[in-house]
Amino acid sequence: AFVKHSEYLHCLKTTASATEGSTVSFKTAMNFDGKLGRGANESSIAIIKNIYKASKKGVGSNKEAEADDSTIEKRRLSDANKPNRKGGDTDDVTTRKSQSGRISKVAKTDKKNVFLQDKIENQTEGKQDDKYFLSSVRNTLKETLDGLLATGEVFYNQKGTRLVTRPQAIPDTFEQCSEILSQKMQSYYYQADEYQNKLLHEFHGQLTKFEQICAHVPRLVIADLLKVEIQRSIHSQNKLSKGFNITLYQLTEKQKLIQNELRPSLGHPQHADELAALYIRGKEQNEEYLEVVKRHIKERQKCALEHARVFFEQLVNLSE
């Protein structure tokens, strides 16, 4: 669970960078190349200003050319040819309008290219980073901004020079609308960045608490494992003791039979052979008893060693 959480927050360190410093840095700006980044917004605004300056210079040069043409016409033509000069003025106005239209069209095209540039450059990267939280948010904002810009461009192209019904809610130009949308998306991204930062701090606190708890885990785990193994050992020892008690009971019954055969008359020399036979039976019974006791002791020792070996093997596996 911790590994998956770390991968989702994109804070899992690689093995190669394990020896490096454990510092975590957070992004404070978003590089959208004209969509959600501050530098990108400034670059897009600078492009628009340059286009407007170029359009103003074009209009100014057209006016100067018009003034020169009118001066030449005044010198060369008579007062009777003034209507022709009006026709020339009309041509100049048409030329200026066409030039202005071309500049406006170029401005919109450049504006659109500026905002779409990041999507073209980061298509592959976006697909690879979709599993991360902040990258998923960034890709969603990119796609949303592209859709809003396309819709806004269609709206302003259809609107033309007509006034909007709600000027307090709808900007006058497409450039103003795109700038507002970029600021909104950038604000959303900053909020997501702050939220991820809070998640990272919370996750860091959980890991710290987990490390503190882990300091007490070995003692508790070893105690629990030892308790289980002792119970198993006791169960095995009781099983051996039960078998030994049955054998001991049988030997005791045999001893009672031999004792019951003993009587004072066996002390007579005539019963010496019978007494010797009882002596041999008693000696064999005693040797059998000693053998059973030795075997029982060895079995108990072997059982204890086996359980100790199993306990240490489990302890080693648990430590690994």
Image (spheres, rainbow, N blue to C red):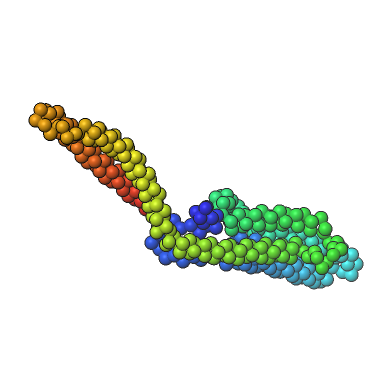
Left or right side of 172 for 202 = left
Front-most of residues 256 and 133? 256
The residue at 79%/56% (across/down) is 155
The residue at 66%/65% (across/down) is 187
The residue at 48%/64% (across/down) is 208
Q: Position of residue 82 (x, y in %)?
A: 88, 67
Left or right side of 15 for 43 = right
Front-most of residues 7 and 211? 211
Where is 187 relative to 249, above or below?
below
Front-most of residues 188 and 125? 188
Left or right side of 2 for 18 = left
Quarter of the view holding residue 138: bottom right
Quarter of the view holding residue 150: bottom right
Residue sitting farthest toward the left: 269
Work out whether residue 8 can be spotted: yes
Q: Position of residue 259 (x, y in %)?
A: 22, 35
Quarter of the view holding residue 162: bottom right
The residue at 10%/28% (across/down) is 270
Where is 109 relative to 86, above or below?
above
